[in-house]
Amino acid sequence: MREPATTPARVEDIHAAALAMPYVSVESAGQNPVYQVGGKSFVFFRNPRKDAFDPATGELYDDVIVIWVGDEDDKAALVQDESGPFFTTPHFHGHRSVLIRAAHVGQVSRAEITELVRDAWLSRASKRRAKEWLTQRAAESEPT
């Protein structure tokens, strides 16, 4: 039985989606994992930094996740909806990534977060690895 497309995402889904991709290594930034392909990060969990904080209290967010995107248009599409969970900070101006707080991951579906992590991997993988993965995935989805 397939789960509904609207099932809320969990932080565990980000980890699972990243680990499901080929050629992934996991580095560590303190307690926070950094998922890489070919030595390039595509998802990482940040330590608190002064550029991401609660505007009401000034408290630094300790649950920010950085996810790479394909290009600036992809980034703009995700962060332009102020009611959505994705955001950016001046520190990430010109950087092909979006931020999301772990506390807000459930505002998107598991399917959406999985697709976003896969797209992050594709944006950072070598052309050969990306083509190989896309070819394999297309073959798996062909009817038998």
Image (cartoon, rainbow, N blue to C red):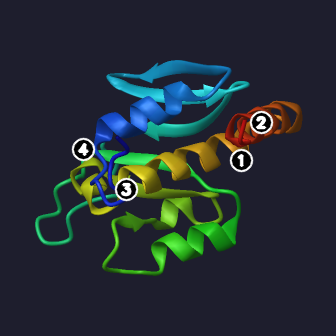
Q: CA distance from mark 4 to mark 1?
A: 26 Å
Q: Position of residue 15 (x, y in %)?
A: 41, 31
Amino acid type, residue under disc 1 in the picture: Ser
Task: Tell me if label 3 and label 4 are in contact, CB under 8 Å.
Answer: no
User: What residue sits right under mark 2 in the picture?
Assistant: 139
User: What residue sits right under mark 3 in the picture?
Assistant: 100
Q: Position of residue 91 (x, y in %)?
A: 51, 60
Q: CA distance from mark 1 to mark 2?
A: 21 Å
Amino acid type, residue under disc 4 in the picture: Asp
Rendered image: mark on residue 123 = 1
Q: CA distance from mark 3 to mark 4?
A: 11 Å
At x 47%, y 80%, the residue is: 80
User: What residue sits right under mark 4 in the picture?
Assistant: 62
At mark 4, the secondary structure is: loop
Q: Position of residue 96 (x, y in %)?
A: 64, 58
Mark 4 or mark 1, which has the lower sequence index?
4
- Camera-near label (2 vs 4) is 2
Mark 1 or mark 2, which has the lower sequence index?
1
Q: CA distance from mark 3 to mark 1?
A: 18 Å
Mark 2 or mark 4, which has the lower sequence index?
4
At x 16%, y 56%, the residue is: 59
Mark 3 or mark 4, which has the lower sequence index?
4
At x 37%, y 44%, the residue is: 2
